[in-house]
């Protein structure tokens, strides 16, 4: 009898633990309940025009392009102080639970997810299936813009989540680090893309960002994700540095590795290929 009780207790613990490690992916029903209780900040990562047409009740609009600084290199994030000012003006409290969604492709939500985690938000989640699943679940939507109470943003930047060009150069040829290009295969191979200098950073491996998602925009299961990353050579004992053209697509992969699989050392190369190829001395394969 004692053995049965012990086994049951262990099984219950295992089930609870499994839920905890994947808690950053939240279902439509879970988010709906949280909105009713009023204990969540919902973030629409869609552009302002789409937000104006329709969004989740109470959602705040954060568009990733608003976080980029002006200059010759596209999509480089502004300074932490500038980002903090934007987040504060939007009423983002880093100590509260934040759930992000987009139109279903995961790119915009992933970029905002990474920015929020980099800026020190403690509990950031992504709505599984995004707006498509919300509408499919026949949940309410609105066109009314959410009134925002501005605040002083108090999050502490986590530099361990961000890689610079110097970090990328240092990792080339280092077996303890895996440099991951999350673009489409034809971009990785230099056959397509917006860059003048096409190709990829020497030593990088290819892992298309869409590999973490099902066709309907929901996340693949933990076991399937673990298998896919392991087969690609992206394993938890290695440091992983992710990039694409602008690192927008890298965010959703960052989320899968850090929050679903709990990899301990994952960074996003914010400058990505736009910054790398801007310097003619940086090699491209």
Image (cartoon, grey):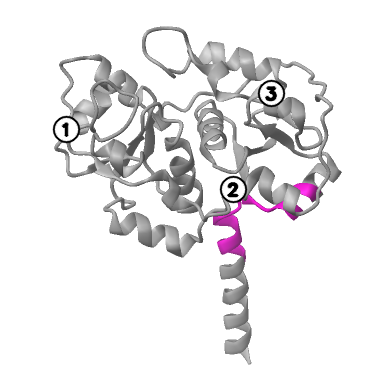
- Residue that carries the numbered disc 3 in the rendered image: 49
- Residue that carries the numbered disc 1 in the rendered image: 285
Q: Secondary structure at mark 2?
A: loop
Which of the two residues, 85 or 68, is positioned nearer the viewer here?
68
- For the point 61% across and 52% down, which residue is it? 23
- The picture places residue 217, in percent across and down from the top left corner, at 57, 50
**Residue 140 vertical placement versus 81 (above, below):** below
Q: Earlier in the sequence, mark 2 or mark 3?
A: 2
Question: Is there any visible trace of residue 283 in the rendered image?
Answer: yes
- For the point 30% across and 50% down, which residue is it? 234
User: Which stretch appears magenta?
Assistant: 16-32
Dot 2: within a 10 Å radius of its alpha carbon, few (fewer than 14), some, or many (20 or more) residues?
many
Q: Earlier in the sequence, mark 3 or mark 1?
A: 3
- Residue that carries the numbered disc 2 in the rendered image: 24
Q: Secondary structure at mark 1?
A: loop
- Give the left or right position of residue 77, taking residue 22 as reference: left
Question: Is there any visible trace of residue 152 in the rendered image?
Answer: no
Image quarter of residue 178? top left
Instruction: Work out how far the residue at label 1 is from the one at label 2, CA to CA, in angstroms.
Output: 36 Å
């Amino acid at each position: 009898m004692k053995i049965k009780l012990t086994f049951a207790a262990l099984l219950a613990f295992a089930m609870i633990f499994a839920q905890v490690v994947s808690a950053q992916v939240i279902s439509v029903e879970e988010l709906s309940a949280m909105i009713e209780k009023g204990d969540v900040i919902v973030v629409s990562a869609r552009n302002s025009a789409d937000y104006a047409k329709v969004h989740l009740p109470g959602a705040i609009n954060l568009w990733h392009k608003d976080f980029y600084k002006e200059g010759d290199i596209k999509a480089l994030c502004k300074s932490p102080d500038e980002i903090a000012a934007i987040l504060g003006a939007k009423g983002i409290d880093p100590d509260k639970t934040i759930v992000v969604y987009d139109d279903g492709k995961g790119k915009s939500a992933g970029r905002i997810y990474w920015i929020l985690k980099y800026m020190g938000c403690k509990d950031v989640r992504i709505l599984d299936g995004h707006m498509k699943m919300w509408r499919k679940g026949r949940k309410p939507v609105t066109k009314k813009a959410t009134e925002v109470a501005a605040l002083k943003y108090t999050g502490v930047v986590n530099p361990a989540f961000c890689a610079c060009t110097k970090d990328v150069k240092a990792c080339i040829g280092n077996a303890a680090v895996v440099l991951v290009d999350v673009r489409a295969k034809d971009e990785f191979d230099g056959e397509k893309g917006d860059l003048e200098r096409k190709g990829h950073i020497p030593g990088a491996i290819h892992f298309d960002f869409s590999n973490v998602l099902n066709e309907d925009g929901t996340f693949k299961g933990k076991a399937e994700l673990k298998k896919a990353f392991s087969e690609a050579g992206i394993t938890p004992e290695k440091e992983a540095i992710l990039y694409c053209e602008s690192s927008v697509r890298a965010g959703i992969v960052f989320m899968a590795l850090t929050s679903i699989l709990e990899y301990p050392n994952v960074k996003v190369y914010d400058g990505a290929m736009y910054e790398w190829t801007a310097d003619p001395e940086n090699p491209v394969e």
